[in-house]
């Protein structure tokens, strides 16, 4: 088993800017030379913001959080902003107007996101993370002040040319005045954080470029200062789709929404074509180790060394080592020689639920029938044959009696993993019916 990489910068890069370049974390920036100089020098204060559009952050946000952490490791001070006000307005998407969420929900999500961000950044030392909420300075501001102090610096022509606004202007639906004004709010945040904390850099996904430069422009006009923006590339999967999002479903950082087991499996199943880039983006492994794993992927892709290392490092960073070790144990128990009985209930439940073939049952259901219900066999006679050949097990115990039931075989009183042959698995949950009865 490989060791967990310490959360530190790669000594091969004395300037964190060069490490960010190596990792492919910079897609666009205000001024690469100035930023290299700035980030290689005395500590600066920078910020990155997230809107409370869901109860949890997701993997796309994690890419930003990791860049924040790297900059923090280089001595710079992160401000983690949660958009208590911007979350009430909605950053325009290129496709359609957002549905407004009610204020109570947004306020609740602000709390969750704040707590979550703090888990990934350090609160220690000379440059501890500080959590800020833009509702604190937006709520007390009057409309007249907003238009006079801030709005006066914005040109409508420039605002209309921002990507998301431009595509919405072309759409039939158009764009509301509220969403159109979003960039002004984000610009106002940057200026406020400049005034309060001397913050001179904002980080965001490359889709945030318009909003980031709204801030640098405002600071230049209102304060006569050159502030900076860094846009990181949007992480995409092997098909070029937004990473960790399938059918509108994200991979969430909250273990209640995406279990550590599912998270571990997600990393483990990544394509050879993108695994090296993912190691760069999502781990603290040094470049020397990443190059080794790139070589291993080229030489012996079937061993999936890079994927295993990625899954271990990334899941541990997100959920900690004990939860990750449980997820690994569950993977071994399902797909290797590991022991199902040793798994904790939550891990086992997540592992069972992850299997493609599923059934719910009563705690005394016949195995024969479950084989058919889960689709492990086509017919009952098929099921009988499989048992007679010694090819069926429940929770890794071979079944010899065709009349066997789940009784006495369930784990944690409700779970069973049915196996046919070596590799075909189905999950059975006998807890739901039992609860109903
Ligand atoms: N607009 C950002 C969130 C954000 C909000 C306010 C800010 O000041 C900065 C960033 C997003 O949608 O991801």
Image (tube, rainbow, N blue to C red):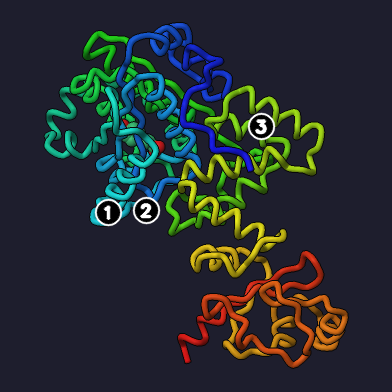
Q: Which mark is residue 145?
A: none
Looking at the image, tell me whether mark 1 or mark 3 is earlier in sequence order: 1
Say which residue appears at 29% left-offset and 30% top-offset: 124
- The answer for how far apart the CA atoms under marks 2 and 1 are is 8 Å
Mark 2–mark 1 CB contact (< 8 Å)? yes
Query: Which one is closest to the eye, mark 3 or mark 2?
Result: 3
SS state under label 3: helix
Classify mark 1: helix, strand or loop. Answer: helix
- Which residue is nearer to you in this view: 205 or 356? 356
List the residue tagged with mark 2: 55
Disc nearer the start of the sequence (2/1)? 2
Residue drawn at x 21%, y 39% is: 135
Residue position for label 3: 276
Residue 249 position, x and y percent, is: 53, 54
The numbered disc on residue 108 is 1
Number of residues whose C-alpha sits closer than 10 Å to that of mark 2, classed few (under 14), some (14–19) or many (20 or more): some
Q: Could you tell whether 209 is left or right of 2 in the image?
A: left
- Residue 141 at what x, y percent from top left? 13, 34
Circle 1: is it few (<14), some (14-19), or many (20+) Cα within 10 Å?
Answer: some
Q: Against 200, is 63 above or below? A: below
Give the image location of residue 394, x and y in percent: 69, 77
Name the secondary structure under disc 2: loop
Instruction: Estimate the spatial distance between the alpha carbons at disc 1 and disc 3, rounded to whole Å.
Output: 37 Å
Can you tell which quarter of the image residue 195 is in? Answer: top left
| Whether residue 263 is visible | yes
């Amino acid at each position: 088993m490989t060791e967990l990489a310490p959360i530190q910068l790669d000594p091969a890069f004395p300037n964190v800017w060069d490490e960010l370049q190596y990792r492919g974390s910079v897609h666009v920036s205000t001024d690469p030379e100035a930023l290299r100089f700035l980030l290689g020098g005395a500590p600066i204060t920078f910020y990155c913001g997230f809107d409370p559009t869901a109860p949890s952050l997701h993997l796309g946000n994690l890419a930003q959080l990791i860049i924040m952490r790297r900059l923090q490791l280089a001595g710079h001070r992160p401000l983690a902003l949660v958009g208590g006000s911007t979350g009430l307005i909605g950053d325009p998407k290129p496709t359609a107007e957002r549905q407004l969420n009610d204020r109570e929900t947004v306020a609740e999500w602000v709390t969750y996101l704040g707590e979550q961000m703090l888990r990934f950044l350090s609160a220690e030392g000379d440059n501890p993370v500080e959590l800020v909420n833009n509702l604190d300075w937006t709520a007390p501001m009057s409309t007249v002040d907003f238009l006079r102090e801030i709005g006066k610096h914005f040109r409508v022509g420039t605002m209309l040319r921002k990507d998301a606004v431009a595509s919405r202007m072309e759409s039939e639906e158009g764009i509301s005045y509220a969403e159109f004004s979003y960039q002004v709010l984000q610009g106002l945040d940057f200026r406020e954080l400049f005034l309060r904390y001397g913050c001179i850099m904002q980080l965001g996904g490359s889709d945030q470029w318009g909003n980031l430069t709204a801030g640098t422009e405002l600071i230049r006009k209102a304060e006569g200062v050159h502030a900076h923006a860094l846009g990181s590339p949007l992480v995409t999967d092997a098909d070029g789709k937004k990473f960790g999002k399938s059918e509108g479903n994200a991979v969430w950082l909250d273990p209640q929404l995406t279990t550590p087991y599912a998270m571990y499996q997600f990393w483990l199943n990544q394509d050879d074509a993108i695994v090296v880039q993912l190691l760069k983006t999502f781990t603290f492994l040094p470049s020397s180790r990443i190059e080794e794993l790139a070589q291993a992927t080229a030489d012996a892709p079937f061993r999936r060394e890079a994927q295993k290392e990625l899954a271990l490092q990334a899941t541990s960073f997100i959920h900690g080592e004990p939860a990750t070790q449980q997820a690994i144990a569950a993977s071994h128990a399902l797909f290797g020689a590991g022991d199902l009985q040793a798994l904790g209930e939550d891990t086992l439940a997540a592992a069972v639920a992850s299997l493609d073939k599923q059934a719910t049952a009563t705690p005394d259901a016949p195995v024969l029938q479950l084989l058919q219900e889960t689709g492990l066999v086509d017919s009952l006679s098929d099921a009988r044959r499989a048992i007679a050949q010694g090819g069926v097990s429940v929770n890794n115990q071979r079944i010899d009696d065709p009349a066997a039931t789940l009784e006495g075989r369930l784990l944690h009183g409700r779970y069973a993993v049915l196996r046919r042959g070596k590799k075909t698995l189905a999950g059975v949950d006998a807890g739901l019916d039992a609860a109903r009865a």
